[in-house]
Amino acid sequence: MSLVGTPQLAGDAAVAVSGLRVRIASREILKGVSAGFARGRVTAVIGPTGCGKTTLLRSLNRLNDQRPGMRVEGEILLEGQSVYHRGRDVRDLRRRIGMLFQRPNPFPQSIRENVALGARVHGLWRREEVDRRVEELLRRVGLWDAVHDRLGSSPFALSGGQQQLLCMARALAVDPQVLLLDEPTSALDPHSTARIEELIGSLRERITVVFVTHNLQQAARCADEVLFLLAGEVVEQASVADFFQRPADLRSRAYIEGKPV
Ligand SMILES: Nc1ncnc2c1ncn2[C@@H]1O[C@H](COP(=O)(O)OP(=O)(O)OP(=O)(O)O)[C@@H](O)[C@H]1O
Ligand SMILES: [Mg+2]
C-alpha cells in the first residue's frame, strides 16, 4: 500500500475505514484497508475482479456478518461511531447505509410496497403521505410514467433497468446517509445507465455515495474520488483529477492504461 486517504479526507469522512481485514477460513480477502468516504462526495471503488470491492462495501453496512466463516477486524466509523459497536442496531445501520446490488432484487410484493415498505418498517412516513411519497420517489428515479397505472402489480414484469430504478427508489425511501452501489449499471441499457448516473450526481449534495464500477469512464464522469484496490489492498485513494491525470502509483497508471497490474 503506497498511499491511503489524505488526512484532510479522513477528517471529513462520513465513513472512515481503518485497518480493515476480512478473512474467510485462512484466506485474507482485505488486508488492512484504510480509506475515507467524505460527506457529500461520490467515491468510485475500482480494481480488477476479485480484488475485494464487494467485500469492502458489504463490510460497511455489516452484510458480511451473515456470511459463515467470515471474520472482520479493524475499524469502520459512521459519523465517528463504530458500525461494529456491540450496542449498534444493525437494522438502523442498514437504513443509514443503504445498498444497491449489481442485479436488481425487488421484493416479491407490489411496486408500491417495494418503495413504501422500508419507510413503514422504520416509521418514517405518516399513513396519509404514503401515496404522495411513493409518487415523488418514482418520479425522482424516472419510473413514474412507466408504472403509475400498475402500482399494485408485481415488479417482476418490469425490465431489468426498471427494476434497478425501483430498487434505487426503495433505497432512497428510507433517507440514507450513505448509499453503496455495487456495479449498479452493469446489467443496464445505456438509457437506464444514464438515469442512474444522473441520480448519483443529484444525490451528492446530501448523501455520501460509494460505488463500484469496472467502467473507468463512468468513474471519471460520476465520481469526485477514486479508491483503487488491488488484491485486497489500497493502492491509491485520490481525487478523480489526480488519479486519472497524475496517478501516484505506477500500478494505477498501468490499470488506467489497460495494462496488466
Ligand atoms: N463468501 C466467500 N467465500 C469465499 N471466498 C469469498 C467469499 N466472498 C468473497 N470471496 C473471495 O474474496 C475475493 C474478493 O471478492 P469480492 O467479491 O469482494 O471481489 P470484487 O472485487 O467485488 O470482484 P468483482 O469485480 O468480480 O465483483 C475473491 O477472491 C472471492 O472469491
Ligand atoms: Mg464485486
Image (spheres, rainbow, N blue to C red):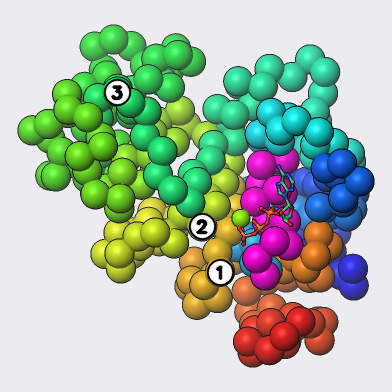
Viewport quadrant of the N terminus: bottom right
Q: Does the residue at mark 3 contact the one at mark 2 (Cβ under 8 Å)? A: no
Answer few, some or many: residues within 10 Å of disc 2's Cα (few below 14, many 20 plus, some between 14 and 19). Answer: many
What mark, if any, has residue 183 been given in the picture? 2
Which amino acid is tagged 3? Gln
Kindly tell me whether residue 6 is visible in this rendering: no
Q: Is residue 251 left or right of residue 216?
A: right
The residue sitting at 21% across, 22% down in the picture is: 131
Judge whether 66 appears above or below 222 on screen: above
Residue drawn at 39 percent across, 59 percent down:
187
Spot occupied by residue 46 in the image (x, y as percentages of width and height): 64, 66
Q: Is residue 242 above or below residue 144?
A: below
How far apart are the alpha carbons under marks 3 and 2?
Answer: 24 Å
In contact (CB < 8 Å): disc 1 and disc 2: yes
The boundaries of the magenta stretch are 48-60
Residue 178 seen in this snapshot = yes
Q: Does the residue tagged 1 have its C-beta within 8 Å of any atom of ligand 1?
A: yes
SS for dot 3: loop
- Mark 3 or 2 closer to N-term? 3
**Number of numbered tags placed on the structure image:** 3
